[in-house]
Image: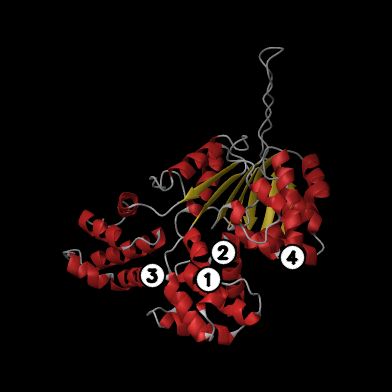
Amino acid sequence: MVTSISEVNGHYTVFTGNQFAAELLRDTYGIKLKNALILSDGGEAVTIDFKFDESAKPSIIVPKQKNAEVRLPEKSSLFVSTMPLNDDYTFDEFVTGPSNSWAHAAAKGAAKEPGKKGFNPLFIHGGTGLGKTHIMQAIGNEIKKNNPKASVCYLTAERFLNEYVNALTSSSIQQFRERYRKIDVLLVDDIQFMSRGKDFQEEFFNTFNSLHNDGKQIVMTSDVAPKDLPGIEPRLISRFEWGMVQEIEQPSYETRLAILKKKSEVMDPPVSEDSLKFIAQNIKSHVRAMEGALGKVNVMMRLDRTIKLSDEILSHLLKDFIEKEKKQKKVTIEEIQSSVASKYSVSVQQILSSERTASFVTPRQLAMYIARKYTTKSLPEIAKEFEKTHATILHGVKSIAKRLDVEPELKENLISVISDFGLTIEDRIG
């Protein structure tokens, strides 16, 4: 029986109720637990020891009645989440409105009854900065609150992939599988990045099946709905749709204002309602931008607590935020297509065509990338303008994103095109 666990500078000590238990755990699970800690970023130098806690007082529980039900203790887990949950991401701190109420209700249902059919898996999708990560982690925090011993794992798909590759490299794939197929709750952010590896998709497919068959809760987030995920195997997409799929949309003015009021309540000094209304009216692209503007106003108020923030002062203070919003709104996809076509000496018709020669594919995908990253247009709107499917748009965007880091000329062309609209690399919203 484990009585307690301590950690000092990477050395873990597991205390047990008797010497036999200490020896049994050391011989049976010592190596496995050490590998699990290494996989959870504990470092190669991590050590683990098992000791008899002589101060522990064993207790004997005798049923009052012969046929009384004996309740077994909940399992104790040494599982350490790869990426820790943010304690601030709770349901109480999540502001609901028409844009996210269904996703919120589904998340509450999954947290209340993890693994229940209908909520498992739960797939939440929507644009950047709309609260997907918040509501996902709120599920994990709520489950941990109700059952502190539950093993809840949160990580991004990219981190999941990196751990898988590391496990293959270090010949520890079995430990990797045991780690992720024995947990109670799996929360995977940005599942769209799973398209990078076919072998990894096979591994995740088997992990998904193992957890789902055992009634364990699975929650995923993505920029798009499962059916629009590019490069993901059909059998995985089918499983993503087994439970419930919910979308988070851009918040309305009323919801934006409610979010700002909620954030302002914990600030010192709190921001006035007039200032909150100004921010809600002028910054609409996503919640993160609103929070950034609110933080800037709060800093100004802390520097000068007597300041009266008129609309004129706020316009000047939040000039960068407001101009960025206006730029993103005024740029049309048609203008982007025309500018990119001119840059590459091709026609807009060739960009819209299905020809696969490199001279057309690159400008076509670059135009898609700019439309997705530098406008507030939705994915369906962009797909319609390019006469393509959602999956084709996402594939083009990701292709350019990968090439930008290794192709200086492509990056220069991107900068040149967006500068025509008064934009910079830093102005992207997605």
Q: Which of marks 1 and 4 is nearer the N terminus?
A: 4
Does the residue at mark 1 contact the one at mark 4 (Cβ under 8 Å)? no
User: SS at mark 3?
Assistant: helix
Residue underneath mark 1: 368
- Tell me the colour scheme of the image: secondary structure
**At label 3, which amino acid type do we have?**
Gln
x, y percentage for residue 114?
60, 37
Does the residue at mark 2 contact the one at mark 3 (Cβ under 8 Å)? no
Q: Which mark is residue 328?
A: 3
x, y percentage for residue 331?
39, 72
Mark 1 or 4, closer to the camera: 1
Mark 3 or 4, closer to the camera: 3
* Residue at (74, 44) in percent of width and height: 210
Residue underneath mark 2: 388
Residue underneath mark 4: 166
* Residue at (57, 34) in percent of width and height: 113
* Residue at (56, 42) in percent of width and height: 144
Using the image as rendered, state which of residue 78 and residue 294 is in the foreground. 294
Mark 2 or 3, closer to the camera: 2
